[in-house]
Structures are given as structure tokens and as C-alpha cells.
């Protein structure tokens, strides 16, 4: 044996192969099937994914020439990426009361969380004290915060100056921000870092009608931004939340385009109010929903920085203004209530792509997020998902780990270009708000969501544990208890007590300050802060602010989860069990030897377990009479014939006769779809056909709703 070479010469020892040689070999493996149809993947973004990418695909791609922290910032807004300053682990803690929030926050900060993510409840976002709001608005998917004492309880024994802060106040930014600022003033905290965001369109997209006129919302955004600038407070005040689009079923390109278009609207509104671009841009934070298409999400986040830099450049902004802060949030759209532990895996891929894409802060969803507020166990798993990716996978050791990938670089450029085309089209409509009034984004997202639904229904796209690989033995996951009435009563009593304690000369001071707020728009934030420090509540501040009636009405987004249609099927199966004592049964009439029936029997079992059916799968039968007798024993109301197309012409009529003899109303389904035999089998009494590409949702819903 000759001595091995000291060095490995890859170029010499492994001569390159041309793309044409590879394609020829691939086409040979396809055995005549069309290359474009079988190996090129169509996406909802309108991008064709090639099966292989080479250096030729990025030859004219300018994005590959950059370094982190420079130029278009595709490789990250910071030159040091996550190496020196890690992304913030910013887990939401959506607990109803400040005390619950504080308990969870202290526990989690001691165990790896690095950002305080406070999510106000619906009443707080609407500037309503608990006793002014409905029960289902108080403590719903967020924390009830009405006065400084609530903020003090939320942050009890926590030095918030040591942590990044994240709070999304939607279109009610000024009352919430002022309450937060009053807390800072009272406790002499002059330095914090984070985001307390105003985002008027978020509430609009969810509610359809804002709380008040839209220009007042922009006035508030302007006031809190100016206040932060004047007080040298390092807080971002302007947010755009794209997660709503993702949770309505939007594509990555649509989400990115609508986020950038919204940001342009917000920039223009602030410029109209006298702020300069280099005062506005650094106050922005963009939030993106993170979905499960790993590479698409990585490329989307990289493209977001490119488009942001392009926009700010067009406004004449400085280099530092082109650096944007991005918050990532796992998608609710992909969360399931069936086989809920699979959500752990979904969150892991979403978290991985968010970090590889370069987010500055991140919320990783708990596996039971769709069931209600997380408990300590599910919080720990979600938080540790981020920590493991940092500490054990070392994702903080390399800046832009996706950089240089032929695939990722090509995909980034394609997403950026397609999103920019949408941005330009919306600009021609008069901007994002005008487009929303015309329902342009809503309609486009609805089309994409419908395409997704059809693909899920036909299992062209898989939701593990729901439309494929279902676990029929699992019990339905229950929603987490939340006694809305008790929370509402407790919080209402608390706020009434606050007001009673203020019904003195001190209360007169509050009324005097509130009157000044009504009459003095230039000092609104300062006066609101003073009122809070005297004991005012968010409801009192909200009522005092000079507002006009809502002047905008739009079509809302349909926020939903992809798995809901399959959860509906399982619920129908569970309802049947409650009535009859057992799950609906499907009998597989497996005809002939194993090799004759197994493939279609296995397919049939997976098909019907999606709907929660108890599938009776036994050995193959030699005669129709034998199969019918076994079907009768099981008590099944539905039978599926499993064999081959060649045997069906003779087998189906005889088996139909035998099955109908033992159960007159038996519904008989054929596994397969032999096109030339369809009419013949329908005449024999076949109820329906199951096959690859069949609409599993429609067929199973029809069966379940017609069962006794």
C-alpha cells in the first residue's frame, strides 16, 4: 500500500462536475418524468426552488459582497453579530395580573431569559380600567395594567435597568408609555434599553375600526418619540408587527412587503410632524412572525434588512439609520392542539431560522400556546430551546451562518425583489393605509391562506399529527382554565379602591392635571406622567386625551391556525364517542394476500386516523363473504375495500353485495382511483374513493357529519 499524501488536494483528487452532467444524471434517475415538474418546487411566494444551486446562481448577486454591519446589512446590522452581544431571549409571559407576571418573570430571569417582554391585555391596550371593560377583555392573553402600582407589582424586586424591555402598545401607545415612564420617574430610573412600541395598524387589522381617529394615533407616536429623544431615553417607540400577517396565512414575501409598506407610512407621518429621518429610523423595531419553512424564514429576515436599508437610503438617512432592530415571534399559525408536543419541534426550527436570520430579540412559543397561558414546564422548554441553540449549538459563535450559501443568497435576493415589487404597487395605491381601506393586502393574504388550506386538505402539505401521522389514541388537549369573571371582579375592585384612596385633595390635583392634558397638546406626555405619579389610572388618562371619532374602517385579517380544520374533524369523532361510547369505526376489507392489499390498507389507515376513526385493520380475506362477516362483527358503519386495480372489476360487485347483506346502510369506499373503472364502481354502490391527492378534510367531514 502506498503512503498516503500529507495533504488533501480537493481540486486535484475530486475533479468538478458540470451542472449539465448533474442534470443529465438526475433526468436519468427520473426515468422520463419531467425535470421541472418533479424537481422544481413551487412556493406560495411565487418563487421556484431549484433542486440544486451553484456559484453561477450568485454570480451577479450584489448581496454576497457585503460584510456584517455594512452597506445593505444583509449579513446583519451589527459588525459583531451575536458573537459579543447575543440576541435577547424575550419570552412573553401573558399572565392576567401583575403579581402572576412578576412571579413568572423573576423565575425565568434567573434561568436564562434576558429580556422583559410585557404584553398588555386588551383592556389596557384600549385605555380601559378593568371596571370599564368587559370580563373577556381583562387579563385576556396579557397582563392587566392600570396604574403605577400595577407596574410596581409587575417589576417588584427586579432591576429593569439591567434588562432589555419589550412591550407592544399597538395604537394606544401614549397612555401605556406614559404609565411606564411615570414608573421610571418615580423610581429614578434614567437609563433603560428596549422597545415600547406604537403600531396603529396592528389594532386596525385585528379590530377593523380603531379606538379613535388614525391621525391622533400618529400624533401620540410623534409625542412619545420626541419625549424619548428629549430625555435621551434609549427606547424604540415605533413598531411594525408582521406576525399578524403570518398568522392569517400570508407568504413570506407578503409579510415582508406589508411590513416595509407600513414602515414607509409611519415614516411619512412622522416626517409630516417635523421629525427628521435620522430621528425616526433609529426608533423603529420590526417584528416578524417566524414560520416553519426554515430556509425561507432565514432569507426573509436577511431580505428585510436589505429593504429597510434601501428605504432609509431613499429618504437620505445616515448609515446608522439603515440598521434596523428585528424582533422574531414564533408563528401561532403553525401551532396545533392535536399532538401538541410536536409543537416543540416546530418551535425549534422556527427559533433556529430566526437566529440564523439575525433577529435582535426572540419569543419562542411554548408548545401549549394555543391552549392558554403557559405553565412553568412549557415556559422552561421554550426558553431552553433558545438557550440550547446558543450554548450547545453555538449559533452565537458565527455571524450570519447562512451567508455564502448559493441557495440562501439566491432566495434572499428573490424575496427582496418580489417584496419590493409589492411595496411599489402599494405605493401607487397611495400607501399601506389606502391599500388596507381597499382590502388589497387582506384579499391577497386570503388567497394565499385558501391555497394553503386546499393543500393541507389534500395533504400536499403536511401538518404532522394532524393531516398526516395522526395519533388516534391521544385524548383531546383541554383548554387551560381561566376564570374571566374572577379576574374581572378582582381587578375591578382593585382599581375602584385606587380611586377611593384618591378621593381627597390629592384627587383634585389629578383632575386639575387631567384638565391640562385636554387643553395642552404640547405637554401631553409630561402631564400624563405627572397624573400617573399622583395616582391617575389608564382609564382616566384615556378618557381625558382629546380624541376624534374613528375615521377609518377596514376589513380585518382572519387570524387562524392551519390545523383548525383537522381539529374540527377530531372534535366530531370525540362527539360521536360521547354519544356512542366508542370512536367511529372504519373496517378495512383487505382482500387477498399481503402484497396485494398492504400498500392501500396502510394508506387507508393513515387517511382515516386523521379524522379520529378507529381503523380495524386485520389479515387479508380470501372471499367477500369472509370479509363481510368480519365487518359485521366490528359494528363498523363504513368499510374500505383494499386491493389492486386489476382485481377491482370482479371483486367490487361481489364484495358490495356481501357487505350490504350484513349491513344495509354500510358506506363502502374504494382505496384507489382507477380512472377507467370509476363509473362502473359508482354503479356498484361505491360511496367514494380515497387516493393520494384526495381532499381528506372534505371526505372525512362528510362521513363524520352523516354518522348516527
Image (spheres, rainbow, N blue to C red):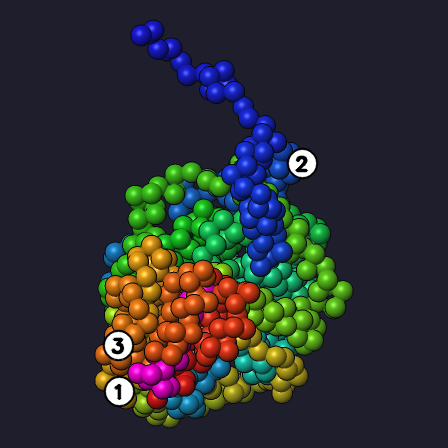
Residue drawn at x 34%, y 47% as measured from the top left: 389
Could you tell me residue 654's position as x and y percent? 39, 74
Q: Which of 478 and 554 is in front in this view?
A: 478
* 119 to the left or right of 308: left
Q: Nearer the viewer, residue 675 or 498?
A: 675
Could you tell me residue 338's position as x and y percent? 33, 70
* 152 to the left or right of 284: left
The range drawn in magenta is 659-672
Total residue callouts: 3
Q: Give neighbour class at mark 2: few <14, some 14-19, many 20+ (Cα, 10 Å).
A: few
Q: Give neighbour class at mark 3: few <14, some 14-19, many 20+ (Cα, 10 Å).
A: some
Residue drawn at x 49%, y 49% as measured from the top left: 295
Could you tell me residue 693's position as x and y percent? 50, 63
* Front disc: 3 or 1: 3
Q: Give neighbour class at mark 1: few <14, some 14-19, many 20+ (Cα, 10 Å).
A: few
Q: Nearer the viewer, residue 448 or 69?
A: 448
Are discs 2 and 3 less than 8 Å apart at CB? no
* Front disc: 2 or 1: 1
Residue drawn at x 71%, y 65% as measured from the top left: 426
The disc placed on residue 60 is 2
Measured in 3D between alpha carbons, the distance from the residue under mark 3 to the one under mark 1, in whole angstroms, is 22 Å
Measured in 3D between alpha carbons, the distance from the residue under mark 2 to the one under mark 1, in whole angstroms, is 66 Å
The disc placed on residue 10 is none
Residue 386 sits above or below residue 556 on the image: above
Q: Can residue 94 be seen in this view?
A: no
Q: Earlier in the sequence, mark 2 or mark 3?
A: 2
Quadrant where the image shows the N terminus: top left
List the residue tagged with mark 1.
Answer: 580
Considering the numbered disc 3 on the image, is that residue within a helix, a strand or a loop? helix
Considering the numbered disc 2 on the image, is that residue within a helix, a strand or a loop? loop
Residue drawn at x 26%, y 87% as measured from the top left: 580
Amino acid at each position: 500500500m502506498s503512503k498516503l499524501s500529507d495533504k488533501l488536494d480537493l481540486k486535484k483528487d475530486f475533479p468538478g462536475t458540470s451542472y449539465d452532467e448533474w442534470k443529465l444524471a438526475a433526468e436519468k434517475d427520473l426515468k422520463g418524468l419531467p425535470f421541472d415538474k418533479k424537481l422544481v418546487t413551487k412556493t406560495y411566494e411565487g418563487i421556484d426552488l431549484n433542486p440544486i444551486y451553484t456559484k453561477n446562481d450568485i454570480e451577479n448577486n450584489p448581496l454576497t459582497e457585503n460584510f456584517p454591519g455594512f452597506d445593505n446589512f444583509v449579513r446583519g446590522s451589527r459588525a459583531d453579530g451575536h458573537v459579543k452581544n447575543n440576541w435577547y431571549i424575550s419570552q412573553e409571559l401573558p399572565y392576567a395580573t401583575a403579581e402572576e407576571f412578576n412571579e413568572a418573570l423573576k423565575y425565568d430571569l434567573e434561568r436564562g431569559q434576558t429580556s422583559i417582554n410585557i404584553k398588555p391585555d386588551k383592556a389596557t391596550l384600549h385605555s380601559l380600567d378593568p371596571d370599564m371593560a368587559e370580563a373577556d377583555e381583562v387579563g385576556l392573553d396579557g397582563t392587566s395594567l392600570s396604574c403605577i402600582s400595577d407596574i410596581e407589582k409587575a417589576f417588584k424586586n427586579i432591576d429593569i435597568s439591567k434588562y432589555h424591555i419589550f412591550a407592544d402598545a399597538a395604537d394606544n401607545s401614549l397612555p401605556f408609555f406614559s404609565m411606564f415612564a411615570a414608573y421610571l420617574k418615580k423610581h429614578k430610573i434614567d437609563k433603560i434599553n428596549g422597545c415600547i412600541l406604537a403600531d396603529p395598524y396592528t389594532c386596525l387589522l385585528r379590530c377593523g375600526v380603531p379606538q379613535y381617529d388614525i391621525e391622533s394615533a400618529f400624533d401620540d407616536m410623534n409625542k412619545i418619540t420626541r419625549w424619548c429623544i428629549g430625555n435621551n431615553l434609549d427606547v424604540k417607540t415605533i413598531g411594525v408587527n408582521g406576525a399578524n400577517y403570518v398568522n392569517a396565512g400570508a407568504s413570506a414575501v407578503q409579510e415582508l412587503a406589508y411590513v416595509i409598506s407600513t414602515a414607509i407610512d409611519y415614516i411619512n407621518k412622522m416626517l409630516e410632524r417635523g421629525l427628521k429621518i435620522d430621528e425616526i429610523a433609529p426608533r423603529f423595531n420590526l417584528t416578524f412572525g417566524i414560520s416553519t419553512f426554515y430556509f425561507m424564514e432565514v432569507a426573509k429576515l436577511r431580505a428585510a434588512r436589505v429593504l429597510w436599508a434601501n428605504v432609509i437610503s431613499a429618504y437620505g438617512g445616515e448609515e446608522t439609520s439603515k440598521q434596523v432592530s428585528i424582533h422574531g415571534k414564533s408563528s401561532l399559525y403553525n401551532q396545533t392542539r392535536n399532538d401538541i408536543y410536536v409543537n416543540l419541534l416546530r418551535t425549534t426550527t422556527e427559533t433556529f431560522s430566526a437566529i440564523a436570520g439575525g433577529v435582535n430579540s426572540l419569543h419562542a412559543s411554548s408548545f401549549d400556546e394555543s391552549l392558554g397561558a403557559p405553565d412553568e414546564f412549557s415556559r422552561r422548554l421554550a426558553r431552553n430551546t433558545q438557550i440550547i441553540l446558543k450554548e450547545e449549538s453555538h449559533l452565537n459563535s458565527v455571524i450570519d451562518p447562512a451567508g455564502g450559501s448559493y441557495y440562501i443568497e439566491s432566495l434572499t435576493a428573490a424575496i427582496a425583489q418580489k417584496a419590493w415589487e409589492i411595496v411599489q404597487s402599494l405605493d401607487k395605491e397611495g400607501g399601506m393605509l389606502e391599500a388596507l381601506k381597499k382590502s388589497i393586502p387582506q384579499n391577497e393574504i386570503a388567497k394565499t391562506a385558501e391555497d394553503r388550506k386546499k393543500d393541507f386538505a389534500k395533504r400536499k402539505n403536511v401538518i404532522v399529527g394532524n393531516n398526516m401521522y395522526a395519533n388516534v389514541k391521544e385524548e383531546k388537549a383541554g383548554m387551560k382554565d381561566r376564570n374571566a369573571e374572577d379576574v374581572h371582579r378582582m381587578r375591578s375592585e382593585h382599581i375602584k379602591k385606587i380611586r377611593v384612596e384618591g378621593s381627597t385633595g390629592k384627587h383634585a390635583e389629578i383632575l386639575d392635571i387631567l384638565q391640562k392634558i385636554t387643553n395642552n397638546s404640547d405637554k401631553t406626555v409630561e402631564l400624563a406622567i405627572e397624573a400617573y405619579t399622583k395616582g391617575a389610572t389608564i382609564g382616566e388618562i384615556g378618557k381625558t386625551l382629546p380624541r376624534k371619532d374613528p375615521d377609518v374602517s377596514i376589513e380585518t385579517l382572519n387570524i387562524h391556525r392551519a390545523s383548525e380544520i383537522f381539529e374540527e374533524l377530531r372534535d366530531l369523532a370525540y362527539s360521536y364517542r360521547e354519544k356512542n361510547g366508542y370512536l367511529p369505526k372504519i373496517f378495512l376489507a383487505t382482500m387477498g394476500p399481503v402484497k396485494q392489499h398492504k400498500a392501500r390498507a396502510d394508506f387507508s389507515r393513515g387517511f382515516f386516523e386523521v379524522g379520529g376513526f378507529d381503523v380495524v385493520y386485520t389479515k387479508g380475506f380470501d372471499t367477500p363473504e369472509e370479509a363481510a362477516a368480519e365487518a359485521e362483527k366490528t359494528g363498523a358503519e363504513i368499510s374500505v375495500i383494499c386491493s389492486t386495480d386489476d382485481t377491482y372489476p370482479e371483486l367490487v360487485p361481489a364484495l358490495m353485495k356481501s357487505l350490504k347483506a350484513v349491513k344495509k346502510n354500510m358506506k363502502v369506499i374504494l382505496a384507489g382511483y382507477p380512472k377507467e373503472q370509476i363509473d362502473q364502481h359508482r354503479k356498484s354502490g361505491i360511496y367514494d374513493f380515497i387516493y393520494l391527492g384526495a381532499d381528506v378534510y372534505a371526505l372525512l367531514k362528510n362521513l363524520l357529519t352523516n354518522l348516527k
